[in-house]
Amino acid sequence: MAFDRVSLSLTSLPNELLYMITNELDIASASKLSRTCISFRQALKEHIEGEMARQDALPREQDYNLIQQKLSCGENIDKQMSAENIPEENMAWAVKRGRVDILQRYLTAGVDPNSYTLSGKPMVSYAACEGQVESARILLHYGADPCLRNRCGGQTPLGYAVCGTFDKSRRVAMIELLLRAGAKITSLEHLRLICYIPEYPEPLVRLAVRNGREFLALRDRCDQTVLYKAVRYSTGLTALILKAAPELLHERTPDGKTALHVAVEHGYEAAARYLIARNEITNEVDSHGQTALHIAVSRDLTTVKLFTSCPNIELNRSSGSHQTPLALAISYHLYSGCYFDIIDHLLRIPRIWIDPDSVRAIKHIFRRKSSLWTSGDVLLLLRFAWVYAKQEGYFSHFKICQALVLALLTSPIWFAYFPFIVDLIGVGFGV
């Protein structure tokens, strides 16, 4: 009769309280009580199955503490413990193998989705590290924290995903899954890898912006902002970052470089064009006194034309080494012979001014043996002499034309330069 009274008393309790009572029992006590109290059997059955699943899924707490102590001392677990002595990690095994059926059974039984492996990785980080997208999906569905850091080193699940060695499609799928779950970019290195992995990184970065603006304030070891990284990849990504953080447009690094300097320096003409359209100041100088145009003359003609088409560009500004863009281009041509088109373009601009450094640089080219002169060198000399003579007012336009023609008529190669002479005369007359 006493058991009946106990049974009646227990069944009158709310279910929530019954579950709290069963959670305080060990498996043997719960099993005995379930046989004694029939009406209590279902709650106890769930408790027993859950407790057995938890014991099967994860190592004991003392095992965690022992191995974490060894790891913190820099010891190698594989050398310190034989394979048979290392505790089983069945939940980690299910995550690694993609056995979502076993993993879901553990999670349904109440195993914490934020549990750690013995090496200190959260289960979702372990899934990201192994490229098991479905395992990560199940863990996140049961409430795993997408921002939970590793116990050793502080790496995040997203960090493991972007640094993974598995195939590109799974990496993209894993990154997207974590970002949709709320993961945050905590390093510009992570952003660099996210931009590098997929063909079109904009959707992934848009998800990161939605999860928080903190990463927009990140800087790397060179004090470069996220915008400096964006201009290296695409105009779309540059536009996305500037829309989210317009204040980054005029940020500078310690060496004085703006995002426009970086875009030109690395040859990203489309990004440079976009920055100029967004009113980036084209005449800003870095710590070496160089504007973006000074850097552009070392790149290609297309980038130079982008700047010379700007009405407010300072074409004749000297750098910290006291060289104008024209003088720099001539100096580069002296050593490589590949800058004729840039010099020719600059000399055709009415606003260009030939400074003494440019004159000295052109003299260096023609101090070489005449046998080393190329046809491009001769054309360059003619163009330069023509513009310089006009600038200094040495001759009238007609007299310059006359002098050059007479000079070339005495040379057996004048026929080769006849089309250029006609073009030269046309430029001189403003045609």
Image (spheres, grey):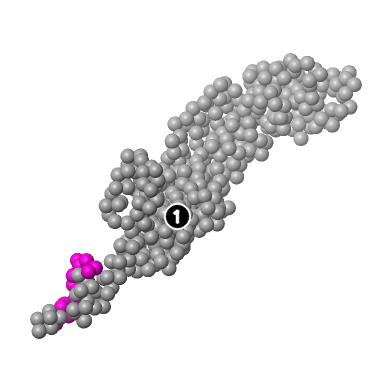
Q: Nearer the viewer, residue 206 or 329?
A: 206
Q: Position of residue 426 (x, y in %)?
A: 79, 32
Q: Position of residue 346 (x, y in %)?
A: 68, 31
Residue 357 lies in the magenta-colored region: no
**Residue occupying the point 47% across, 30% down:** 255
Q: Nearer the viewer, residue 266 or 282?
A: 266
Q: Is residue 184 visible?
A: no
Vertical side of 21 occupied by 318: above or below: above
Disc 1 crowd rating (10 Å Cα; few below 14, some 14-19, many 20+) is many
Segment tinted magenta in the rendering? 8-28
The kind of secondary structure element at disc 1 is helix
The residue beneath circle 1 is 128
Q: Please name the amino acid that badge 1 sits on.
A: Ala
**Residue occupying the point 19% across, 75% down:** 33
In this rendering, position of residue 30 left or right of residue 145: left
In this rendering, position of residue 180 left or right of residue 306: left
State which quarter of the image contains the N terminus.
bottom left
Q: Position of residue 196 (x, y in %)?
A: 54, 48
Q: Is residue 197 visible?
A: yes
State which quarter of the image contains the C terminus.
top right
Q: Nearer the viewer, residue 393 or 213?
A: 213
